[in-house]
Amino acid sequence: MMKFYGDISGSNFFPDAMLLEKNQRLWSKFAENTAELESLRYKGGSIQPMVWASAMEEVVKMRTEMLRAWLEASMNEEEV
C-alpha cells in the first residue's frame, strides 16, 4: 500500500500534497478503529489479535486498490 501512496504523492494527480497526507492520516485512524471494532467481540480471548489482524488486512487491501485506481487515473491523465 505504501508503494502506491508514495507513487501517488509524487504524481500530478494530487496537486495538494497536504490534502493527500491528511486523507492518509484519517484513513489510518479509520483502519485502526475498524480493526478494533471487528475484534471487540473477542476481547480478552486468544483469537482477538488474529481477528484484529485479519480485519486490518481487509481494510488495507481496499485502500491499496483505491490508491492503485488513483495512480492509474493519474497516469491516464498524464498521457492525454
Image (spheres, rainbow, N blue to C red):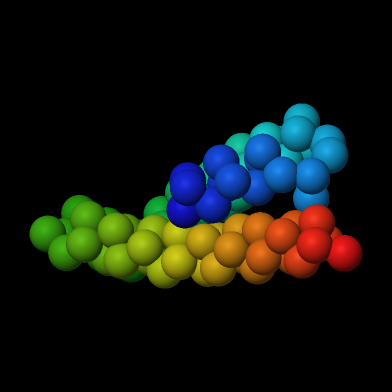
For the C terminus, the image quarter is bottom right
> Against 59, is 18 above or below?
above
Residue that appears at 75% across and 58% down: 74
Q: Position of residue 73 (x, y in %)?
A: 74, 65
Direction from residue 31 to residue 39 in the image, left or right: left
Q: Nearer the viewer, residue 40 or 10?
A: 10
Residue that appears at 21% across and 62% down: 50
> Against 40, is 19 above or below?
above
Direction from residue 40 to residue 68 in the image, left or right: right
> Against 11, is 55 above or below?
below
Q: Position of residue 65 (x, y in %)?
A: 55, 68
> Against 70, is 28 above or below?
above
Residue that appears at 80% across and 56% down: 78
The answer to whether residue 56 shows anywhere in this view is: yes
Q: Nearer the viewer, residue 13 or 78?
A: 78
Q: Residue reaching furthest front?
A: 79
Q: Position of residue 12 (x, y in %)?
A: 79, 44
The answer to whether residue 29 shows anywhere in this view is: no
Counting every numbered tag in the picture gives 0
Q: Residue reaching furthest top?
A: 18
Q: Nearer the viewer, residue 20 or 6?
A: 6
Q: Position of residue 31 (x, y in %)?
A: 50, 53
Residue that appears at 76% across and 34% down: 17
Direction from residue 2 to residue 79 in the image, left or right: right
Quadrant in the picture for residue 49: bottom left
Q: Residue reaching furthest right?
A: 80
